Image (cartoon, grey):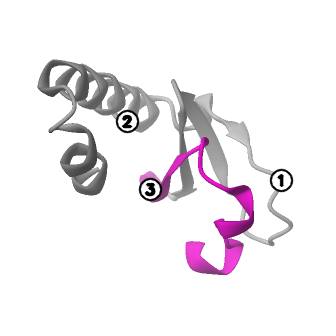
Amino acid sequence: MARIYSYLEPRSLRAVRGLMRRLFRAIEMLAEMPRMGSVADLGTEKEYRQHVVEHYKIYYYVEEERLVIVRLWDTRQNPTTFFVSDLS
């Protein structure tokens, strides 16, 4: 999230702060209802889930009662740069 903030902050401080609020709110909701996100079909044994907030996907998995966020992905990026092996 820090990289997103650093990238967007010079363009519009107000917009980036609003985005950060929405992302944090979504993460708080996922922490309370972790099965809210859809299952991400990544071809792995581990069940990753995803939740969309504007142009961003939050990739995570649930471990016992813990929400583990592994990637915040800007969906406008080239999808060939998304490597499932980087999630572990």
Q: In the visual, does 11 lie left or right of 25?
A: left
Question: What residue is disc 3 on?
Answer: 69
- Judging depth in this view, the residue of 8 and 45 nearest the camera is 8
Residue displayed at 45% across by 51% down: 65
> Which residue is at a point 51% across and 58% down the rendered structure image?
64
Q: Is residue 22 inside the magenta stretch? A: no
**Does the CB distance between marks 1 and 2 fall below 8 Å?**
no
Which of the pair 69/67 is nearer the observer? 69
- 69 part of magenta stretch: yes
Residue count near mark 3 (Cα–Cα under 10 Å), binned few <14, some 14–19, many ≥20 = some
| Residue type at the position of mark 1 | Asp
- Residue denoted by label 2: 27
Q: Is residue 59 visible?
A: yes
Amino acid at dot 3 = Ile
- Evaluate if marks 1 and 3 touch, with contact meaning CB atoms under 8 Å apart: no
Callout 2: SS: helix
Q: Which residues are magenta?
A: 65-88
Task: Find disc 1 in the rendering and name its residue.
Answer: 41
From the viewer's side, name the closer residue of 55 and 57: 55
Label 2 with label 3: CB-CB less than 8 Å: yes
Write down the quadrant of residue 30 in the picture: top left
Q: CA distance from mark 1 to mark 3?
A: 16 Å
Dot placed on the residue nearer the N-terminal end, 2 or 3:
2
Q: Could you give the CA–CA distance between mark 1 and mark 2, rounded to whole angstroms?
A: 20 Å
Q: Quadrant of residue 25?
A: top left
Q: CA distance from mark 2 to mark 3?
A: 9 Å
